[in-house]
Image (spheres, grey):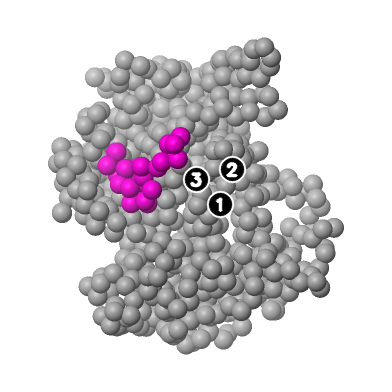
Amino acid sequence: MNGKSCCGDIETAGDKMTGFHEIEERLKSEAFRLLQAGEVSVVLAYGKGTDERHPVPFAALTTADVENIVFNEHCTHNMARYLLRYPSGTKIAVALKGVDSRAVVVLIQEGKINRDNLVILGIPTNSMRNQQNGQIIDARTTCGIANPVLFDILLGEEVHEATVASPYDVLAPYEAMDEDARWNFWKTELDRCIRCYACRKACPMCYCDPCFIDVTKPRWANKSPQLAGNLMYHLTRFQHLAGRCVDCGECSRVCPVAIPLYLFHKKVAKDCEEMFQQTAGMRIEDKPVIVDFRVEDSDKILE
Amino acid sequence: MIEERLVLKKTAIEKINELAAALMEMGTLIAPVQEAVGANFKTIENPQEVSLDFYNTVLSPKFVFFPQTENFLSYQIAKPFTNAEPVELAITPVFLFGVRPCDTRSFAILDRHFEASSIVDPYWRKRRENATIFGYAFALDTPPDNADFYSMLGIHAADTEGSDIFMVRNDGELLLKSITSKGEQLLSELTLLQETSSDDENYYTEYLARGREYKTRTLCLEQETAAGKFEEIFYNNDFWGKTASACLSCGICTFVCPTCYCFDICDETMFKKGTRRRVWDSCMFTDFTLEASGHNPRTNVFQRLRQKVCHKYSYSPRKYDVISCVGCGRCVRSCPVNIDIYSIVSSALKI
């Protein structure tokens, strides 16, 4: 982890790493091979959308579907989100970028998916772009990890350029705030929420059915998008993701009113690292922090 | 029929803040301001905030007439009786400034829903009556956004329908033409506006004509054909399954949509004091169709997406004789996974 700014380096790093076109070709050929051999019944990747800037998460079910697969810098969606839609036992191949693979690690740890039913097509890249604002997605809004931590087939050269600052550097100005200022900051941000629930729906870790916010007996929060209910929804969701959020940043990218949800998740992840020396979804053999009690665990959380 | 009125005035673009200030003197001004996510309609507190340099707003202006939260009555739970009082609608004249033609059309579509039957929604009606709408033509010298498809719905880039006053930009100037008598009266009251010449008249007329030729992506769509087609393919689970395979079932598309009007009525109580409210709901939410028994007739994502598309392109034409979509492209732009309703309609028509 170094603290230097990363933006300048990223533009040139693109030349050294495997290009998007090559990744797309390899994605297609692996998808074709796996579907033809019957090794999987679905390949989760990206397909053509309205235009090049708007690819769509895509499920290829037959070899004929493969030609619709694309991969470019706008394929930012976390495909781990779709794994739980398929009946358990379904053999699935899934295209995962660095951070996406961390989500799959957590899903495996939590017993939601079986590693044996997955073929992970890993995509090493650090040049994805936010579709809304065109900016490079890096450690300021995500964990910034370029290489998948878990994969069966790697679709390109691993990225080794030190382009990534600490994912927690971005927290500095918020950590410097006093309690009142922080409270006011979050009140202002969460007051804007229109409760479309895109954040939880895009989140690979939000798989509860029903989500607490949809429960009517009891009703945990008001339905109207006003501060009290908004706080109840977001603060509860933040807690539910403690030690589980992999900092993919999808919740913030999908937000129609640009609430920087990633800041809260990053802060909780940082606390989790400091207190329990564990980063979510980095090692498949880890137990989830929330369920793993160790005598030597920090008691700081109780203070 | 709306009679075309003759008053044409103008102002310099750099002076729209003065126009904004004048409107704020007369009532509430709701106009586009630049926010972190893009432009959005806001109640203006500082006339300097008003900006006409936008393509279209992220959220639609429907909230001006159909707010996300509408309070019906307030109550205090007590013994032996709970006291309840209706919440009076505090209405001031509203000036809704800078509305694109696709959005002015959306108000007419929602009118049919809120007023078409013998039951008129008084909240909607009162708000509509108290508003003066300043329509604002799209810029014709730049291409439309790839997401837009209002041409398919028969809406022009400089369509005056639904506006009281229609605004067209001419370099550094803004031309304002009255469309209704309400607009005509307002324009005559706004003394800070300048008189126009015959050149301005010609520019305005020509702009409207060019607006008719300007096209977003489009295809030939007959209302009757669309309505029939979606009835025919309702049970085509293969089509709907594929169409919805990426859908996350969040509510963005319905919340940004200018014609979605579904709501829920909730009693929201805190410490025995509460409010009965109407709050936007979304057919994309899992609990939208959840019945008291626990049964949910729409358990799959594809059933919910199908409902949304069929409502707009089939049920609405059958019930209100209008497709309840204006092709503004907001749902396409806002969708986290880039689901495109235009593509859904065009694929459906090919089946």
Q: Quick check: B115 above or below B55? A: above
On whether residue B304 falls in the magenta region, the answer is yes
Q: CA distance from mark 2 to mark 1?
A: 9 Å
Which disc number belongs to residue A192?
A: 2
- The answer to whether residue B327 shows anywhere in this view is no
Look at the image and give the residue range highlighted in magenta. Answer: B290-312
| 2 and 1 marks in contact (CB < 8 Å) | yes
Q: Horizontal and vertical percent for residue A20?
A: 40, 78
**Same chain, marks 2 and 1?**
yes
Label 1: which secondary element: loop
Q: Secondary structure at mark 2?
A: loop
Is residue A255 shown left or right of residue B210? right
Residue drawn at x 48%, y 26% is B95
Q: Which residue is mark 3?
A: A196
Q: Which mark identifies residue A258?
A: 1
Q: Quadrant of residue A240?
A: bottom right
Quarter of the rendering occupied by the C terminus of chain B: bottom left
Q: Is residue A301 visible?
A: yes
Say which label, 2 or 1, has the lower sequence index: 2
Q: CA distance from mark 1 to mark 3?
A: 12 Å
Q: Is residue A100 left or right of residue B203?
A: right
Q: As shown in the figure, which amino acid type bears the numbered disc 3?
A: Cys
* Three-letter amino acid code of the residue under disc 2: Arg
Q: Secondary structure at mark 3?
A: loop
Q: Residue at x 41, y 30 (%)?
A: B134
Looking at the rendering, which quadrant does residue B24 occupy?
Answer: top right
Q: Are marks 1 and 3 on the same chain?
A: yes
* Numbered-mark total: 3
